[in-house]
Amino acid sequence: MKKLIVAFAVAGLALSPVFAKPLKVPLKAENGSGESGYALLYPHGSRTRVVVHLHGTPKGVVQPEHIHPGSCPNINPRPAYMLKSVRNGKAVTMIHVRLKNLLKRPFAINVHASHQDMQKSVACGDIRAQ
């Protein structure tokens, strides 16, 4: 019986979305910001974990980010999904949408300069299948 329980536990770990290969989205600098990096999108069943890594971010500045319909640099200004703000170049957010649904039409991750300067984009990356 113990062997059966262990087998099911191991099988469950193997099928766990935590071990799924992430989609890497390059984030390119915009508007002369010098900020660039990448986002990793991990499928978690009906949700997606978004992990953002940016280099060249200003210290102490909180930078809002969102997933917008469209492609960089011509995104729809109204966000489709809110993400946690970038702090010290990093942010992690779990959103309630399947990764495969983010790949069905154009979406982009957009990082704004600050809460005071939401009109200025400092980094953007198109979400595309690899």
Image (cartoon, rainbow, N blue to C red):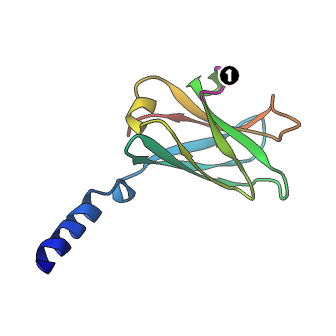
Q: Which residue is mark 1?
A: 78
Q: Secondary structure under badge 1?
A: loop
**Magenta span includes 87:** no
Could you say which quadrant of the image residue 46 lies in? Answer: top left
Residue under the point 83% across and 58% down: 59
Residue 42 seen by the camera = yes
Q: Position of residue 65 (x, y in %)?
A: 69, 40
Q: How many marks?
A: 1
> Which stretch appears magenta?
76-80
Please name the predominant secondary structure of the magenta segment in the image. Answer: loop
For badge 1, the amino acid type reads Arg
**Magenta span includes 78:** yes
Residue farthest toward the right in the current orientation of the protein? 116
- Image quarter hosting the N terminus: bottom left
> Is 24 situated left or right of 100 in this image?
right
Residue under the point 64% across and 21% down: 74
Residue under the point 75% across and 47% down: 34
Residue 71 seen by the camera = no
Residue farthest toward the front in the current orientation of the protein? 1
- Does residue 18 lie above or below 126 as drawn? below
Q: Nearer the viewer, residue 93 or 63?
A: 93
Q: Position of residue 87 (x, y in %)?
A: 74, 55
